[in-house]
C-alpha cells in the first residue's frame, strides 16, 4: 500500500491520497489519540473493520526527542495494510527537520502536524493548539516541512485558539504550503472536547482549500458521519472517541455507503472486544493493576453505550484487578440474557467518559 503512494513532486496530477479500501467510497480515518492509537488498538479495530487511514498518537518533538518505539511499531509492524501517518507535535524548526529526516527511513504514509492539542501544559509551550495563535510561525514550520517531507504532508488542526479570528489566515497558510490533507477538529482549543463543534468551519475549509478536508468532532454513528460529510462537502470523516466506544464504526460506514444493513453489535460482541483489547494491550511484566487502569481509559468510552443508567461505568471505575474488571463485564454484557441485547449505537444521554481520572498521563485529553 505504502509503495503505491506517489511523491508529491513526481506526480502532481495523480490523486495524492491513498485510495479508500473500498474503491469509490469516501474515506474514514481513526483519529490520533495519545495512549490509545498504538499498534494494539489499531489491530483490535482492524479486526472489526479498519478505517481507510490511521494516524499515530503524537510524537513530542524537542531538542532531545527521538522516535518512540511504540509509535514506530504502529508504522513498521502494522499488519492492517492501511496507510499510517506519523503525527508530530513541536515548534522548533531544526528539531522537526531532524525528526522528519529520521522518519524517511520508515514507511509512514506521510507526516502530520498537530495544531490542536488543548492540554495547557502543551499549548503553554506554544506547540499543538498553542500555535494557532501565531499563523506566521505555522507558515514557517510548514514551509520547512513541505521542503523536507517527501511523501504526504498533512495537518490536524482546530478552528482557532480562543475563537476563529485567524481561521482564514490559517487556510491561506495551508494553501501556500501545499498541504495534502487537513483534518479539521471543528472546535477551538479553549472549546476542549465538550463544546458543540462548528461544522460551518469544515464547509468553509472545503470551499477555500486546495486539498481535501477530513471532518472531525462528535461523529457518533455511521448515519451521522454520512449526514455531516454530505452537508459540509468534506472529503471524509475522522473519528476518535466513537471508535473506542464502537470499533465497528468504520465497517458500519462502509456498509452504509454500500446501501447495506449495518452490522449491529450485541453486548456479547462488546465483551469479546473488551477481552481482545485486554489481551492485545497487555505487555509482559506490566503490573496487573496498571493493565486494568489502562483498560479503564478505553472502557470509559465503551460504557457510554452499555446501559442508560451508567451502572457499568460506575462499577468498572471501581475495579482494581483483572478479575474485578471482567466480573463487571460479565454482569453487564453477558449475564441474564444481556449477551443477546444490542449495544446502543450512540452514547446514552447524560453519561460522561472520564478517561483522565484513571490514566497515568492526561496527555491531549483535558
Ligand atoms: C484520549 C485522547 C487523546 C488524544 N490525543 C490526540 C493526539 O495525540 N493528537 C491529536 O491530534 N489529537 C488527539 N486527540 C483529539 C482527537 O484526535 C480528536 O480530534 C477529538 O477526540 C475529536 O474527535 P472525536 O469527537 O471523534 O473524538 C485526542 C483525543 C482523546 C479523546
Image (spheres, grey):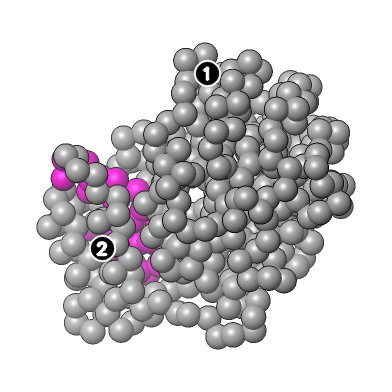
Residue 133 appears in the figure: no
State which tag comes first along the sequence, 1 or 2. Answer: 1
- In depth, the one of 278 and 22 nearer the eye is 22
- C-alpha span from label 1 to label 2: 37 Å
Q: Measuring 29% from the left and 62% from the top, which residue is drawn there?
A: 276
Numbered disc 1: secondary structure? loop
- Which image quadrant is residue 305 in? bottom left
Q: Residue at x 52, y 14 (%)?
A: 63
Label 1 environment density (alpha carbons within 10 Å; few <14, some 14–19, many ≥20): some
Find the magenta span and give its range.
Answer: 287-315
- Is residue 32 or residue 241 the one in the foreground? 32
Asked if residue 299 is positioned above or below residue 177 in the image, the reply reads: below
Which residue matches tag 2?
Answer: 275
Q: Which mark is residue 62?
A: 1
Residue displayed at 62% across by 50% down: 3
Number of numbered tags placed on the structure image: 2
Amino acid at each position: 500500500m505504502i509503495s503505491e503512494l506517489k511523491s508529491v513532486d513526481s506526480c502532481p496530477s495523480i490523486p495524492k491520497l491513498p485510495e479508500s479500501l473500498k474503491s469509490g467510497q469516501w474515506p474514514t480515518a481513526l483519529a490520533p489519540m495519545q495512549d490509545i492509537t498504538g499498534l494494539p488498538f489499531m489491530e483490535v479495530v482492524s479486526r472489526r473493520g479498519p478505517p481507510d487511514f490511521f494516524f499515530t498518537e503524537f510524537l513530542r518533538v524537542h531538542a532531545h526527542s527521538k522516535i518512540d518505539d511504540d509509535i514506530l511499531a504502529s508504522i513498521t509492524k502494522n499488519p492492517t495494510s492501511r496507510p499510517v501517518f506519523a503525527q508530530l507535535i513541536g515548534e522548533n524548526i531544526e528539531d522537526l527537520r531532524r525528526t522528519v529526516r529520521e522518519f524517511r527511513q520508515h514507511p509512514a504514509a506521510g507526516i502530520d502536524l498537530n495544531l490542536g492539542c488543548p492540554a495547557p501544559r502543551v499549548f503553554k509551550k506554544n506547540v499543538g493548539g498553542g500555535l494557532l495563535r501565531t499563523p506566521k510561525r505555522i507558515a514557517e514550520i510548514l514551509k520547512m516541512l513541505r521542503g523536507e517531507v517527501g511523501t504526504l504532508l498533512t495537518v490536524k488542526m482546530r478552528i482557532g485558539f480562543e475563537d476563529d479570528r485567524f481561521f482564514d489566515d490559517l487556510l491561506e497558510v495551508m494553501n501556500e504550503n501545499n498541504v495534502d490533507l487537513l483534518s479539521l477538529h471543528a472546535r477551538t482549543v479553549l472549546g476542549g472536547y465538550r463544546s458543540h463543534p462548528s461544522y460551518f468551519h469544515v464547509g468553509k475549509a472545503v470551499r477555500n482549500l486546495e486539498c481535501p478536508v477530513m471532518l472531525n468532532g462528535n461523529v457518533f454513528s455511521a448515519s451521522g458521519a454520512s449526514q455531516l460529510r454530505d452537508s459540509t462537502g468534506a472529503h471524509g470523516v475522522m473519528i476518535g472517541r466513537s471508535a473506542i466506544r464502537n470499533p465497528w464504526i468504520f465497517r458500519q460506514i462502509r456498509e452504509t455507503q454500500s446501501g447495506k444493513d449495518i452490522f449491529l453489535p450485541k453486548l456479547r460482541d462488546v465483551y469479546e472486544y473488551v477481552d481482545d483489547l485486554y489481551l492485545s494491550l497487555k505487555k509482559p511484566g506490566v503490573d496487573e493493576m496498571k493493565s486494568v487502569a489502562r483498560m479503564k481509559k478505553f472502557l470509559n468510552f465503551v460504557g457510554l453505550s452499555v446501559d442508560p443508567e451508567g451502572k457499568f461505568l460506575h462499577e468498572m471505575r471501581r475495579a482494581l484487578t483483572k478479575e474485578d474488571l471482567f466480573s463487571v463485564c460479565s454482569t453487564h454484557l453477558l449475564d441474564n440474557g444481556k449477551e443477546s441485547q444490542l449495544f446502543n449505537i450512540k452514547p446514552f444521554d447524560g453519561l460522561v467518559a472520564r478517561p483522565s481520572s484513571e490514566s497515568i498521563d492526561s496527555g491531549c485529553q483535558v
